[in-house]
Amino acid sequence: MMVHMGDVFRALADPTRRTILDELAERDGQTLFEICSRLTMKYGISSSRQAISQHLDVLADAGLVRTRRDGRFKFHYIDPAPLDRLTERWRPKGERQ
């Protein structure tokens, strides 16, 4: 999947999406229900499940979140690879991998 850097910047522009990434970085592989519960309990974010699902879709479209289905459950995982490509752009040529 080709990810455009504009999509990554747009995904990161929203504070709720950044909090979702923080949460997945702390505890990867969560379901939508778990993410919603933890956002409410830890951060006081009381968005609807539909709103959080839409945020997850934006993050997935930007390549920052991957999903895996297991039966009825859909697990969400952080994927920092687009961030690596993003920061690589401004590293001095001698420091690039």
Image: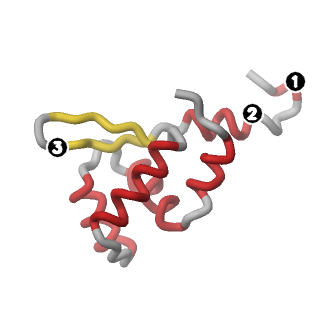
* Image-quadrant location for residue 90: top right
Name the residue carrying label 2: 88
Q: Nearer the viewer, residue 81 or 67?
A: 67
Whole-number angstrom distance, CA of label 3 to CA of label 1: 45 Å
- For label 2, the SS is helix
The amino acid type, in three-letter code, at marker 2 is Glu
Is mark 3 in CB contact (under 8 Å) with mark 1? no
> Would residue 33 be found to the left or right of residue 17 on screen?
left
Q: Nearer the viewer, residue 51 or 35?
A: 51
Mark 1 vs mark 2: which is more N-terminal?
A: 2
Whole-number angstrom distance, CA of label 3 to CA of label 2: 35 Å
Name the residue carrying label 3: 73
Tell which tag, 3 or 1, sits nearer the viewer.
3
Give the vertical position of 41 relative to 5 (above or below): below
> Would residue 66 be found to the left or right of residue 71 on screen?
right
Q: Residue furthest left?
A: 71
Instruction: Please count the marks in the image.
Output: 3
Mark 3 vs mark 2: which is more N-terminal?
A: 3
Q: Residue at x 70, y 39 (%)?
A: 86
Name the residue carrying label 1: 94
Q: Could you tell me residue 67's position as x and y percent?
A: 33, 38
Q: Could you tell me residue 38's position as x and y percent?
A: 29, 65
Q: Residues within 10 Å of mark 1 (few under 14, many from 20)?
A: few
Whole-number angstrom distance, CA of label 1 to CA of label 2: 11 Å
Q: Residue furthest right?
A: 93
The amino acid type, in three-letter code, at marker 3 is Phe
Q: Could you tell me residue 80's position as x and y percent?
A: 53, 38
